[in-house]
Image (cartoon, grey):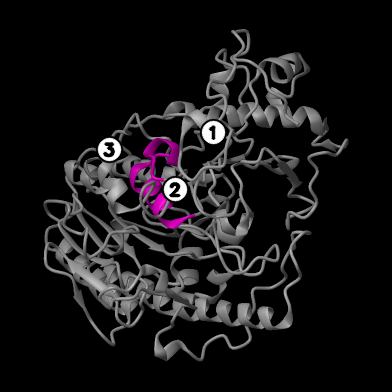
């Protein structure tokens, strides 16, 4: 089956202060360095970080945790492209992991190889490096057609063996691809990262550095047929493979309680035992990533670079294991798949602090630009995160997450909204079949009780009226660009008198939202982003002309 867009928003009542794109660096100050460590498919809500002592020591204790950080799309290639561009999926048009709607070849055809973070950072005077996975379909056939732009040095993990832990396919700079049988891929990346840090340090007098370290742990192992004439249909998936020195770790760990979707069968004991084993293998695979984190900080300390380097730890998307009675996987709108680890450490970053301000991967490059004193680009759909006291919580009360693609067993869905604020914590979903779900996350964190047809109240207002405001906000965000993604209420209320969902609940707006605002609907479940199949695209403006009305039912 195929599915269209998911738009997920998180809203929080936070002061909206006017910000600037001016440099945070004082005249004559050394510009900061940046290291981004991004894992593959790491969960937050199944507590994987609890089993990573290095992440705890270097980030949780010595840095700031962003507790409400969301991936822009719960699938690796689209999510990584949103990180690298600062743009949502409906603006990058990278909506899948493989052609025709995603993957490296789609990245090239969309012109993004000339317009993404490493190119911009080099233009701003940075040396840039990358080791690990870039994106799907970056392979032995496509790696030089063309080479990824914007890097001083690279050591990519590429297909076909990007997910084979003990015989990965590597591609260094502009050399031919190569294999290292018997070498554990995370260890190879750790060695490369240390080498890149040493190389970058040798030129610190001239240029600061931007280094991306992207191990595949704890992604499952994927073995692709390599014999001539074999079909990719012969691909075999296995649980992630830990380094041999870590195979004994966490013998009693389990992913904890699972929530259940009522129409799916209960998991039997055999399935539960397998999922527990799968969970332990993920934790064991992350143990080498944890050692990589230790290696990076040890080298930064040795080179005396810690005081002027921001280090970021995150993942591309979350993961569920048995939650909602589903097998291990991702690509859903549920919290396990979209609320992900995010940690910052560096100069001016508070130690041991947790921030509940909602953020997404579209905010990462704008944040790096702000910290580096680089003017923000107008096409950014995200805004700087408040990682230091000099950067205010200024941008918005929502985050925007989308999805298109094949969901396997996880069901078909299209749009969802998360509202997080004083007195409320909601999730609202519009599927591509135009069915709906609404959850009160304060009382139903497992998302089991659909309130969409309820006659009750949420944060003091009738559910029916809350739904009209959620629909109006989604109408803006499903096709927004730039500042409209950052300040969506200003699109429907240009006079500036509405900044939050509470403002929008004013009774004087009832007729506007109930009778004038178009309703988010989908005409067909399709795999890519086709605006002609995604219903109305232009939201109504309060006091302006209506764009037409379709029923919420």
Residue at position x 43%, y 43% from top?
A: 363
Q: Position of residue 512 (x, y in %)?
A: 70, 15
Q: Nearer the viewer, residue 465 or 406?
A: 406
The percent position of residue 79, horizontal first and vertical second, equals 43, 51
What SS does tag 3 mark?
A: loop
Say which residue label 3 marks.
374
Q: Is residue 416 visible?
A: no
Task: Please say whether residue 6 is one of the residues in the magenta stretch.
Answer: no
User: Quick one: label 2 or label 3, which is nearer the N terminus?
Assistant: 2
> On screen, 508 above or below 193?
above
Q: Which residue is mark 2?
A: 361
As helix, strand or loop, the secondary structure at mark 2 comes to: helix
Q: Is residue 84 left or right of residue 260?
A: left
Within the image, what quadrant is residue 58 found in? bottom left
Q: How dense is the environment of label 1, judged by Cα within 10 Å: few (below 14), some, or many (20 and up)?
A: many
User: Is 339 placed left or right of 22 in the picture?
Assistant: right
Residue under circle 1? Answer: 396
Residue 82 belongs to the span the image colors magenta: yes
Residue 352 seen in the current view: yes
Across and down, in percent, residue 243 comes to 40, 85
Q: Which residue is at the front of the view, 81 or 372?
A: 81
Q: Is residue 308 above or below residue 373?
A: below
Q: Secondary structure at mark 1?
A: loop
Please provide the residue range marked out in magenta.
75-94
Task: Looking at this view, name the residue that lies furthest to the right.
Answer: 455
Would residue 135 be found to the left or right of residue 437 on screen? Answer: left
Q: Which of the two discs, 2 and 3, sits closer to the camera?
A: 2
**In which quarter of the view is residue 521 placed?**
top right
């Amino acid at each position: 089956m195929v599915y269209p867009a998911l738009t997920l928003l998180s809203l929080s009542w936070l002061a909206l202060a006017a910000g600037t794109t001016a440099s945070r660096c004082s005249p004559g100050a050394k510009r900061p360095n940046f290291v981004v460590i991004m894992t593959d498919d790491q969960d937050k809500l199944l507590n994987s970080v609890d089993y990573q002592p290095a992440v705890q020591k270097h980030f949780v204790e010595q840095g700031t945790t962003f507790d409400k950080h969301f991936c822009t799309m719960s699938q690796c290639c689209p999510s990584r492209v949103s990180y690298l561009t600062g743009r949502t999926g409906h603006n990058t048009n990278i909506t899948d992991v493989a052609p025709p709607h995603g993957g490296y070849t789609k990245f090239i055809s969309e012109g993004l190889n000339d317009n993404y973070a490493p190119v911009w950072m080099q233009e701003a005077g940075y040396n840039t490096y990358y080791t690990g996975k870039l994106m799907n379909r970056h392979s032995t056939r496509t790696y030089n057609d063309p080479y990824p732009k914007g890097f001083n040095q690279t050591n990519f993990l590429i297909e076909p063996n990007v997910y084979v832990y003990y015989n990965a396919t590597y591609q260094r700079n502009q050399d031919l691809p190569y294999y290292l049988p018997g070498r554990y891929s995370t260890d190879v990346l750790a060695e490369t990262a240390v080498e890149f840090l040493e190389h970058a340090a040798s030129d610190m007098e001239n240029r600061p550095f931007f280094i991306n370290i992207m191990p595949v742990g704890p992604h499952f192992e994927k073995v692709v047929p390599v014999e001539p004439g074999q079909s990719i249909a012969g691909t075999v998936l296995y649980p992630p493979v830990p380094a041999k020195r870590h195979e004994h770790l966490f013998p009693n760990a389990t992913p904890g309680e699972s929530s259940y979707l009522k129409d799916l069968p209960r998991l039997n004991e055999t399935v539960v035992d397998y999922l527990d084993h799968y969970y332990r293998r993920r934790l064991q695979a992350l143990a080498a990533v944890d050692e990589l984190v230790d290696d990076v900080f040890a080298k930064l300390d040795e080179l005396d670079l810690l005081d002027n380097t921001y280090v970021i730890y995150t993942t591309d998307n979350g993961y569920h294991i048995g939650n909602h009675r589903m097998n291990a996987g991702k690509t859903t709108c549920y919290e396990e798949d979209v609320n992900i680890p995010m940690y910052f450490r560096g100069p001016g970053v508070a130690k041991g602090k947790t921030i509940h301000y909602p953020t997404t991967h579209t905010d990462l490059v704008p944040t790096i630009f702000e910290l580096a004193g680089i003017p923000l680009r107008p096409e950014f759909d995200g805004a700087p995160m408040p990682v230091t006291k000099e950067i205010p919580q200024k941008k918005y009360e929502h985050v925007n997450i989308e999805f298109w693609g094949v969901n396997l067993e996880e069901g078909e869905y299209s749009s969802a909204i998360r509202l997080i604020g004083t007195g409320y914590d909601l999730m609202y979903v519009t599927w591509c079949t135009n069915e709906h779900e609404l959850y009160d996350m304060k009382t139903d964190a497992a998302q089991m009780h659909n309130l969409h047809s309820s006659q009750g109240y949420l944060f003091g207002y009738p559910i029916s009226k809350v739904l009209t405001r959620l629909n109006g906000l989604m109408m803006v965000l499903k096709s927004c660009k730039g500042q409209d993604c950052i300040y969506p209420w200003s699109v429907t209320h240009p006079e500036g008198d509405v900044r939050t969902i509470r403002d929008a609940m004013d009774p004087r707006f009832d007729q506007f939202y109930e009778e004038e605002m178009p309703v988010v609907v989908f005409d067909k479940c399709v795999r890519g982003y086709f605006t002609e199949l995604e219903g109305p695209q232009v939201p109504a403006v309060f006091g302006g002309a209506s764009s037409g009305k379709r029923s919420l039912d």
